[in-house]
């Protein structure tokens, strides 16, 4: 756990993490994946967005550590990384100085 004197480095990391969530579509993708693992085609149908656009946003979410992928046969399945979201909340709590409630 970080102490109350959060470093500039940690603040920059937090900004990068939140930056990865700046898109409405990325939040929609995370919400869809929170319901369960999915491939790009299923997300394309569910969200009514083109495959290239979904793939690009999934890449951004993967690089930020919010989503991970695994190959299942010829398909790539994506899922949310719950620990990454919890870490983000913990860092935010340190920055704000109080615990966020449900």
Image (cartoon, rainbow, N blue to C red):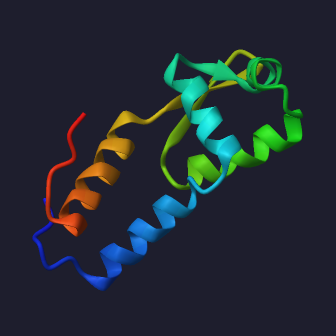
In the rendered view, does 76 fall on the left or right side of 89? right
Name the outermost residue toward the bottom.
Answer: 8
- Along the line of sight, which residue is nearer the eye, 101 or 7? 101
Q: Would you place residue 14 above or below residue 25 in this image?
A: below
In the rendered view, does 27 fall on the left or right side of 73? left
Task: Mark yes or no: residue 71 visible.
Answer: yes
**Residue occupying image coordinates x 85% and y 32%:** 49
The image quarter in which residue 3 lies: bottom left
- Along the line of sight, which residue is nearer the eye, 65 or 3? 3
Task: Mark yes or no: residue 58 visible.
Answer: no
The image quarter in which residue 81 lies: top left
In the rendered view, does 90 fall on the left or right side of 28? left
Quadrant into which the C terminus falls = top left
Measuring from the top left, give residue 76's x and y in whole percent. 69, 26
Measuring from the top left, give residue 55's x and y in whole percent. 77, 40
Measuring from the top left, give residue 45's x and y in whole percent. 82, 18
Quadrant into which the N terminus falls = bottom left
**Residue occupying image coordinates x 83% and y 43%:** 53
In the rendered view, does 1 fall on the left or right side of 45? left
Measuring from the top left, give residue 11's x and y in whole percent. 34, 75
Q: Would you place residue 97 above or below residue 83 in this image?
A: below
**Residue occupying image coordinates x 24% and y 81%:** 7
Q: Would you place residue 9 above or below residue 85 in this image?
A: below
């Amino acid at each position: 756990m970080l102490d109350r004197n959060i470093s500039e480095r940690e603040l920059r990391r937090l900004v990068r993490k939140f930056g990865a969530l700046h898109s409405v579509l990325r939040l929609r993708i995370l919400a869809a994946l929170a319901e369960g693992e999915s491939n790009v085609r299923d997300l394309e149908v569910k969200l009514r967005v083109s495959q290239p656009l979904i793939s690009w946003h999934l890449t951004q979410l993967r690089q930020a550590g919010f989503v991970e992928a695994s190959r299942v046969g010829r398909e790539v399945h994506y899922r949310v990384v719950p620990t990454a979201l919890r870490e983000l909340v913990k860092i935010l709590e340190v920055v704000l100085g109080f615990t966020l409630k449900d």
